[in-house]
């Protein structure tokens, strides 16, 4: 076991921090207020190599190993104040690009990955439905084979990036009687007949990552746009979501480090009753707890990255990482507000936004309750 | 124990609390009935890999291979033959 990062890995994180600080933070308060997605920043990220980082060069990617990708996302999390943008990027990379890479035909990989890596296209993921969230595989969107096309019918909700996306990873059942093994994945393009994007869904945080419903009304999807075999959708979804659980969290870790440094600096500078507030044990302890949570979160996250690199799968550890990092992130955001007192509550201090953004982390990619259920089942309970 | 008996024993132990039965029929539908759900399959894959020394690929997680005990036995034997 080696806890040292290589020089190259350290350099990846540093350059991501520099890029994010210089390029991604303009007009953050306004963009959050207006719920504005920025295609300009999306393209800047693609030019920097974010979307392609973990993907092979033949598709325009950077061929990075998992730990380097995690460090890149961690660096962005530290440097970039726009958690919505990072969330949107992660969503595309792990739940659209990665399934195409891992399960796609040559035609699908060459057709979609270069456009997604270059930022020319944006991808969205459609699993959740109005009546199936945590119980994702009980979905009711259907796909019926008719000649060379599947006809899809149903509604998806909470689809991140949908309002601006060009391509959608949509899950539907080809045969309800096969339970979760009826679920099948389809690559749906915006222009396919019978496909439309519904109204934007307003939300508490991550406001720069747009979200909408997907409506499929006799939507015609060519057979060659089925991803993997019929009935393979659940395995494809689980694989993608495990990637997301492992890597989306890296940006949260970077955010925790940024907050911690800010809190230390503020606790040394802000004086009340004649002393810096950091000299009061209640404040110091909060900061110590932030540090302990961040360091343990880092170990859990890097372990998942190493396990996925070595074995491809890390179901239990990915669930632990998702649970621990998301709950730590929310706590860190709450602590940061508390340590900054009334100023922490103001828009100008930009800590309340982190807090609003953080609340979603125990919901998306499987709620905390579902992560606990997974861990319990794997423990034999 | 045969391959079939080993898998049946595993499934009975895994889901027995939720099932009001003593055994599974070889051609009994395990997917439509929900006896194998998306969580059970994760444990089932680990069990098949460890017990029979095979590799269960994600692309093999389709109804043809997991619909009932018979199809699982066929899948395991085909995989063992390919080693
Ligand atoms: C910001 C954001 C972005 C998202 N992006 C996408 C996306 O791009 N694509 C997509 O398909 N989906 C997306 N989702 C949807 C997300 O995956 C679901 O919200 C999530 O899976 C929970 O489903 P639900 O909202 O229907 O809640 P429900 O499943 O209805 O859960 C409600 C509550 O009950 C609890 N609960 C449910 N079942 C159990 C159980 N068995 N044991 C214990 N507790 C339980 C839950 O934990 C939760 O607290 C996104 C969600 C958010 C918040």
Image: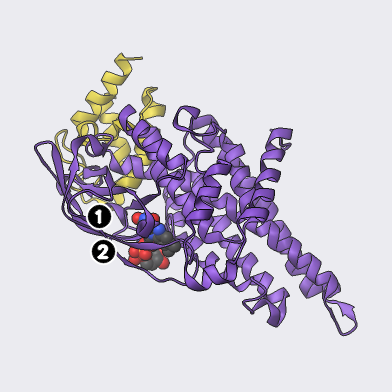
Chain colours: A purple, B yellow
Q: Quadrant of ligand 1?
A: bottom left
Most foreground residue, A295 or A372: A295
How many angstroms separate mark 2 from mark 1 (CA)?
9 Å
Percent x, y of residue A344: 67, 76
Cβ of mark 2 under 8 Å from ligand 1: the answer is no
- The residue at the point 87 percent across, 85 percent down is A273
Q: Outermost residue toward the left? A: A147
Residue A134, can we see it? Answer: yes
Residue A78, can we see it? Answer: no
Label 1 near label 2: C-beta < 8 Å?
Answer: yes
Cβ of mark 1 under 8 Å from ligand 1: the answer is no
Percent x, y of residue A319: 49, 50
Which residue is labeled 2 in the image?
A: A131
Up/down of A286 relative to A225, above or below? below
Q: Outermost residue toward the bottom? A: A273
Mark nearer the N terminus (2 vs 1):
2
Q: Residues within 10 Å of mark 2 (few under 14, many from 20)?
A: some
Describe the element under mark 1 as helix, strand or loop.
Answer: helix
Most foreground residue, A343 or A37: A37
Instruction: Judge from the rendering whether residue B58 lies leftward or rightward of residue A274; answer left or right.
Output: left
Check residue A216 in the rendering and tell me which mark sits there, or answer none: none
Which residue is labeled 1 in the image?
A: A138
- The residue at the point 34 percent across, 34 percent down is A111
Up/down of A31 relative to A309, above or below? below
Percent x, y of residue A328: 60, 61
Quadrant of the image for the N terminus of chain A?
top right
Percent x, y of residue A177: 15, 47
Instruction: Judge from the rendering whether residue A354 lies leftward or rightward of residue A116; answer left or right.
Output: right
Most foreground residue, A210 or A181: A210
């Amino acid at each position: 076991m080696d806890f040292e990062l290589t020089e190259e890995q350290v350099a990846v994180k540093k350059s991501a921090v520099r890029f994010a600080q210089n390029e991604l933070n303009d007009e953050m308060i306004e963009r959050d207020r207006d719920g504005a997605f920025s295609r300009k920043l999306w393209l800047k990220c693609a030019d920097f190599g974010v979307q392609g980082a973990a993907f092979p060069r033949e598709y325009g990617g950077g061929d990075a190993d998992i730990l380097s990708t995690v460090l890149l996302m961690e660096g962005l999390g530290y440097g970039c104040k726009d958690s919505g943008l990072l969330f949107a990027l992660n969503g595309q990379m792990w739940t659209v690009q990665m399934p195409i890479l891992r399960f796609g035909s040559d035609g699908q990989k060459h057709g979609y990955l270069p456009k997604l890596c270059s930022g020319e296209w944006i991808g969205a993921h459609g699993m959740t439905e109005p009546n199936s969230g945590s119980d994702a595989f009980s979905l009711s969107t259907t796909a019926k084979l008719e000649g060379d096309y599947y006809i899809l019918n149903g509604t998806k909700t909470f689809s991140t990036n949908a309002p601006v996306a060009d391509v959608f990873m949509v899950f539907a059942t080809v045969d309800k009687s096969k339970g979760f093994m009826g679920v099948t994945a389809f690559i749906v393009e915006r222009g396919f007949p019978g496909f439309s994007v519904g109204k934007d869904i307003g939300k508490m945080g991550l406001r720069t990552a747009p979200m909408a419903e997907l409506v499929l009304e006799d939507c015609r999807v060519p057979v060659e746009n089925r991803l993997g075999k019929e009935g393979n959708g659940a395995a494809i979804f689980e694989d993608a979501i495990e990637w997301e659980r492992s890597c989306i969290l890296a940006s949260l870790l970077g955010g925790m480090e940024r907050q911690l440094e800010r809190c230390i600096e503020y606790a040394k500078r802000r004086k009340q009753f004649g002393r810096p507030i950091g000299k009061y044990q209640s404040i110091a302890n909060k900061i110590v707890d932030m540090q302990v949570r961040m360091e343990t979160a880092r170990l859990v996250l890097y372990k998942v990255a190493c396990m996925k690199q070595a074995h491809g799968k890390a179901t239990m550890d990915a669930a632990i990482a998702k649970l621990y990092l998301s709950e730590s992130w929310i706590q860190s955001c709450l602590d940061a507000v508390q340590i900054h007192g009334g100023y922490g509550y103001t828009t100008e201090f930009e800590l309340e936004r982190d807090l609003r953004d953080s609340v979603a982390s125990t919901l998306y990619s499987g709620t905390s309750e579902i992560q606990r259920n997974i861990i319990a089942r794997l423990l034999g309970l | 124990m045969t391959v079939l008996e080993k898998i049946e024993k595993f499934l009975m132990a895994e889901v027995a609390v939720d099932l009001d039965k003593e055994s599974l029929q070889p051609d009994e539908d395990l997917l439509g009935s929900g006896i194998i759900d998306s969580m059970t399959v994760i444990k089932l894959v680990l069990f098949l890999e460890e017990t029979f020394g095979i590799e269960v690929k994600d692309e093999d997680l389709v109804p043809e291979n997991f619909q009932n005990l018979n199809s699982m036995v066929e899948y395991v034997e085909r995989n063992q033959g390919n080693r």
